[in-house]
Amino acid sequence: MTRFVVDCGAVLHLAGEGIRVPAEHELLAPTLLRSQTLSTLHEAVHRGELPSDVALARLARVKAMPIRLLGDAVLRRRAWDLAEKMGWAETYVAEYLALTQLQADAFITTDADLARRVDGVVPIASIEVLSTI
């Protein structure tokens, strides 16, 4: 089994495309994923980019995904240290990286710029690996 940490963009891509992740892969994310997906979808509705019913359906698909959400003290401390090392004021991305370092094989994001910036800090995988066995 391959374990992947997925960020908000990756999860929303999976939900939007209706991609079912094969059982051979385990998805992990920090607990902040819940708030990020909710906010990102609500913002899209507010900007007029998505109808409310579509956003709510995607939110329901995200909720149904088998993603193990984690957020213990060890993860938070590692995220703090990574944010310091990277020179970041916020720790949101650092939580994904910390979780990858602690429990996963690779990090998946749809943000190409972010993937370039953190390559070498954690292994990066393409989202396409989630739809293949």
Image (cartoon, rainbow, N blue to C red):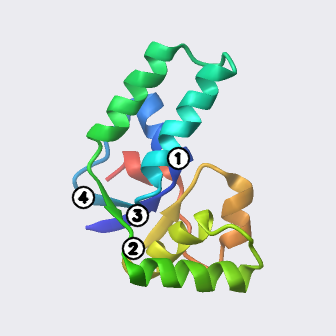
Q: Which residue is mark 1?
A: 36
User: Which amino acid type is shown beneath numbered disc 4?
Assistant: Glu
Q: Give the foreground label among 3 and 1.
A: 1
| Structural distance between the alpha carbons of marks 2 and 4 | 14 Å
Relative to 43, residue 115 above or below: below
Q: Is residue 8 visible?
A: yes
Q: Is residue 111 left or right of residue 74?
A: right
| Structural distance between the alpha carbons of marks 3 and 2 | 5 Å
Q: Which residue is mark 3?
A: 4
Q: Is residue 90 left or right of residue 110?
A: right
| Structural distance between the alpha carbons of marks 1 and 4 | 26 Å
Percent position of residue 45, x then y: 59, 21
| Structural distance between the alpha carbons of marks 2 and 1 | 20 Å
User: Which amino acid type is shown beneath numbered disc 3?
Assistant: Phe
User: Which amino acid type is shown beneath numbered disc 1?
Assistant: Gln
Q: Give the foreground label among 2 and 1.
A: 1
Disc nearer the start of the sequence (4/3):
3
Q: Is residue 10 visible?
A: no
Q: Which residue is mark 2?
A: 104
Pointer 4: residues within 10 angstroms few (<14), some, or many (20+)?
Answer: few
Disc nearer the start of the sequence (2/1):
1
Q: Which residue is mark 4?
A: 24
Pointer 2: residues within 10 angstroms few (<14), some, or many (20+)?
Answer: many
